């Protein structure tokens, strides 16, 4: 697929998270937080209507774009995503999903064209309701618990105080990566953002 084809294909950006003030700045809400940054940057108002989600539409460089945050709680994230895709006639390939990832170190981000859930229950639900794994995603690294806490508690807590600056920088970089996908195509964005510090050369991931 051409880069221009990728630009035209991304019609919706979905951030995963949990609704409610108690979850606002937790690790599991990294996807929500990136979508909030994009909404502010693009001047898109997110409102709760239809689809059991907070969403809105706008334009980015002349293309129509939908931003969406499911409000069904993480484990049922796919329900409103599937409803939205069916309502607007979007194919899975047109939906870019942004989510936290335990298996990436804090601060790392990674784009992929497709892949499995990797143990992420929200992604498992999205895969189920989009009818397969063939949709792009942006993974936001939150790392693993450092103090022996259970994973279930770790993801529902805010970052450790010493990690908060790195977490916020990662969110900014994630929003920047989405903008690159929209303007230059998925392949270009993958080559730019999937490198580790100090890496050179192209790096493209097809699988999660």
Image (cartoon, rainbow, N blue to C red):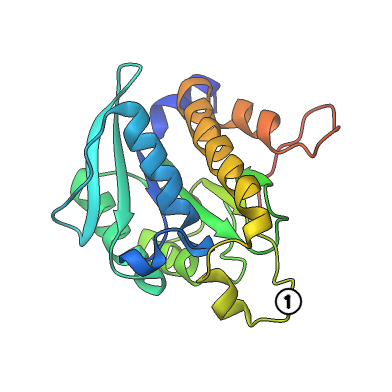
Residue at x 53%, y 63% (from the top left corner): 158
Position of 195 relative to 85 (above/below): above
Residue 190: where, in percent of width, then height? Answer: 64, 34
Vertical arrangement, residue 137 with respect to residue 37, above or below: below
| Residue at horizontal 86 percent and vertical 32 percent from the top | 198
| Left or right position of 182 against 72 | right
Q: Which residue is at a point 54% across and 43% down the rendered structure image?
A: 171
Q: Where, quadrant-wise, is the N terminus in this rendering?
A: top right
Estimate the x, y position of residue 21 in percent, counting from the top left. Answer: 32, 64
Q: Secondary structure at mark 1?
A: loop
Query: Where is residue 79, by image quadrant?
Result: bottom left
| 23 w.r.t. 96: above or below | below
Q: Residue furthest top?
A: 62
Instruction: Mark 1: give few (<14), some (14-19) or many (20+) Cα within 10 Å.
Output: few
Residue reaching furthest to the left = 49
The picture places residue 187, in percent across and down from the top left corner, at 61, 30
Q: Position of residue 27 (x, y in %)?
A: 53, 61
87 or 160, which is in the foreground? 160
**Left or right relative to 23: residue 26:** right
Would residue 41 be seen by someone viewing this image from the given angle?
yes
Residue on which disc 1 sits:
147
Q: What number of labels is visible?
A: 1
Viewer-proximal residue among 204 and 97: 97
Residue nearest the observer in this picture, 118 or 70: 70
The picture quadrant where one finds residue 146 is: bottom right
Query: Which residue appears at 37% of the width and 43% of the height?
Result: 36
Nearest to the observer: residue 164 or residue 204: 164
């Amino acid at each position: 697929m051409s880069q221009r084809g990728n630009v035209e294909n991304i019609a919706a950006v979905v951030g995963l998270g949990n609704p409610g003030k108690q979850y606002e700045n937790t690790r599991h809400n990294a996807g929500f937080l990136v979508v909030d940054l994009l909404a502010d940057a693009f001047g898109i108002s997110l409102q709760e209507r239809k689809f059991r989600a907070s969403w809105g539409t706008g334009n980015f460089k002349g293309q129509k774009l939908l931003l969406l945050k499911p409000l069904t709680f993480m484990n049922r994230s796919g329900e409103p995503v599937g409803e939205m895709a069916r309502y607007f006639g979007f194919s899975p390939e047109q939906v870019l999903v942004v989510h936290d990832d335990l298996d990436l170190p804090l601060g790392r981000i990674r784009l992929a064209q497709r892949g499995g859930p990797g143990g992420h229950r929200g992604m498992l639900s999205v895969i189920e309701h989009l009818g397969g794994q063939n949709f792009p995603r942006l993974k936001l690294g939150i790392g693993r618990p450092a103090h022996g806490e259970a994973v279930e508690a770790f993801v529902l807590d805010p970052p450790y105080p010493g990690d908060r600056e790195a977490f916020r920088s990662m969110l900014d970089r994630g929003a920047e990566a989405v903008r690159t996908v929209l303007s230059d195509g998925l392949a270009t964005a993958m080559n730019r953002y999937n490198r580790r510090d100090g890496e050179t050369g192209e790096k493209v991931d097809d699988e999660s």
